[in-house]
Amino acid sequence: MNNVKKFLTVVCFALVSNFASASDHSYSRKPEGAQIQTLLNAIDFTNYLKVETKVNISFFVNEKNEVIVVDTNNKDLDGIVKSTLNYKKIAVTELEYNKVYTVPVQIK
């Protein structure tokens, strides 16, 4: 189990460099990222946060092209992010199915 956690941590760190902050940067190079950014921009975070924060969102895409949020590193926002993103369909071109990706998101 410890080896699995280490492996997933290494994979997550490797994938973090492929994604940008959802609120500040464009995902023009990654069409899936642009779709996820659009979904996240629909959330009014002012009801949940008083200060700027960074959240890492771990997710995968299933065979039906639906986003499934595995976890976030912010327990206060975990529920709202999951309820907003889970089972939302996206057009997948570059992501592999059932592979966990992590997106760092700067929330202002």
Image (cartoon, rainbow, N blue to C red):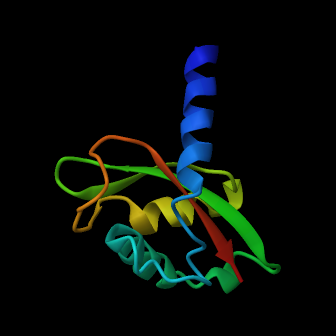
Q: Which residue lies furthest to the left in this view?
A: 64
Q: Residue furthest right?
A: 51
Q: How many numbered marks, from 0 up?
A: 0
Question: Is 74 placed above or below 105 here?
Answer: above
Question: Is 46 placed above or below 17 here?
Answer: below
Is 78 or 55 nearer to us in this picture?
55
State which quadrant residue 32 falls in: bottom left
Residue 70: x and y in percent read 48, 46
- Left or right of 22? Residue 47 is right
Is 7 or 59 nearer to us in this picture?
7
- Left or right of 18? Residue 5 is right
Is 12 or 68 nearer to us in this picture?
12
Q: Quadrant of the C terminus?
A: bottom right
Question: Is 49 placed above or below 4 here?
Answer: below
Residue 8: x and y in percent read 55, 32
- Left or right of 49? Residue 91 is left
Q: Quadrant of the N terminus?
A: top right
Residue 77: x and y in percent read 64, 63
Residue 49: x and y in percent read 75, 76
Q: Which residue is drawn at 25% across and 47% down?
A: 62
Q: Which residue is drawn at 31% across and 54% down?
A: 95
State which quadrant residue 16 falls in: bottom right
Q: Which residue is drawn at 60% across and 16% down?
A: 3
Q: Which residue is drawn at 69% across and 60% down?
A: 76
Question: Is 64 placed above or below 33 here?
Answer: above
